[in-house]
Image: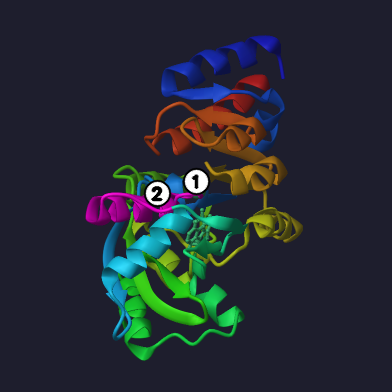
Amino acid sequence: ATPTALLVASGRGAQLGVFIKGHQALESARAIDTIVLDKTGTLTTGRMSVAGVQVAEGVARATVLACAGAVENASEHSVARAVVDLARRELGGVAGVEDFRTLSGLGVRGRVGGRDVTVGTVRLMRAEGLAVPAALEQARSGWEARGHTTVAVAIGTEVVAVLALSDTVRPSARDAVRELHALGLRTVVLTGDNAVTARAVAAEVGAGEVIAEVLPAGKADVIRRLRAEGRTVAMVGDGINDGPALAGADLGLALVTGTDVAVGAADLILMRSDLAVVPAAVRLARATLTTIR
Ligand code: ADP
Ligand code: MG
């Protein structure tokens, strides 16, 4: 790559809202045939709010919110922020938590008022051998089919509630995906969230493939697997758990509003949260190579 071509690319990138960190990545961009898009915080804004609370029979909503709010107050996750917001609004505050632990990609756990409280995926509850009451299961499947992320709350060994979280698909997502397809790319939604919710969001934005329920450490494995299949892969992400996948992709793109880990691992930084920048970056990389060659 000639320095002049790259300088031109940098200038044009700045105009588009793309900061080019790794010039080398522009070289591989020519062959990109697959673009993997993180769901939460990338295709969506990641600013979640609690859209519904279904409690088990005989369980008080205030108890659920007090317990869940206390544990989530120690977590930084977007699910956690939504739960704490609701607890604060309805109860006026949140209690403290002891022995807090993060179960990466699955949930959180701690002791509140001497009781063990777990907030996390239904998959986690099942893995722990906890039964989910039928009424809660029913609420969960309805919410997930509509694209909501759901989490269950357990106090001790009893699953006492399921919460629905609503996130907002970025208004630019659908057009961006359509343009990526027009550029001949295959689109894949990659997420730690459950498959039903992921498919609903993928359908909303028109993405072609869905790889869901991937634990944080597994995202990089997915990229490796796609590359092993002979695909040339770009990854777009924002989260801590996207870092290794961004680094392992042929081209890593991070939202500037994302975590330091994501921004640090990416080759291109998207300076605006408008996803139209993604196909623009692909076009820029291709144009730069045409100039170079
Ligand atoms: P994503 O790939 O969508 O960013 P994560 O890997 O961070 O997802 O989390 C996967 C799933 O684990 C979430 O959809 C949520 O159900 C659950 N989870 C993660 N962190 C928490 C938390 N602090 N509280 C409750 N559930 C959580
Ligand atoms: Mg994310």
Q: Which mark is residue 76?
A: 1
Per the image, the residue denoted by label 2 is 81
Who's the residue at 26% across and 56% down the image? 91
Using the image as rendered, state which of residue 133 and residue 186 is in the foreground.
Answer: 133
Q: Please indicate whether residue 215 sits to the left or right of residue 45 in the image.
A: right
- How crowded pointer 1 is (Cα within 10 Å; few <14, some 14-19, many 20+) is rated as few
Three-letter amino acid code at the position of disc 2: Arg
Q: Secondary structure at mark 1?
A: loop
Residues in magenta, as a range: 73-95
Question: Does residue 92 show up magenta in the picture?
Answer: yes
* Residue 219, position as x, y percentages in the image: 64, 56
For label 2, the crowd category at 10 Å Cα-Cα, with few meaning under 14, some 14 to 19 and many 20 or more, is many
Q: Is residue 261 above or below residue 15?
A: below
What percent of the width, then of the height, locates residue 185?
A: 52, 50
Asked if labels 2 and 1 touch by Cβ distance under 8 angstroms, the answer is yes
The verdict on residue 34 being magenta is: no
Magenta-drawn stretch, dominant element (helix, strand or loop): helix
Mark 1 CB within 8 Å of ligand 1: yes
Q: Secondary structure at mark 2?
A: helix
Q: Which sits in the foreground, 252 or 105?
A: 105
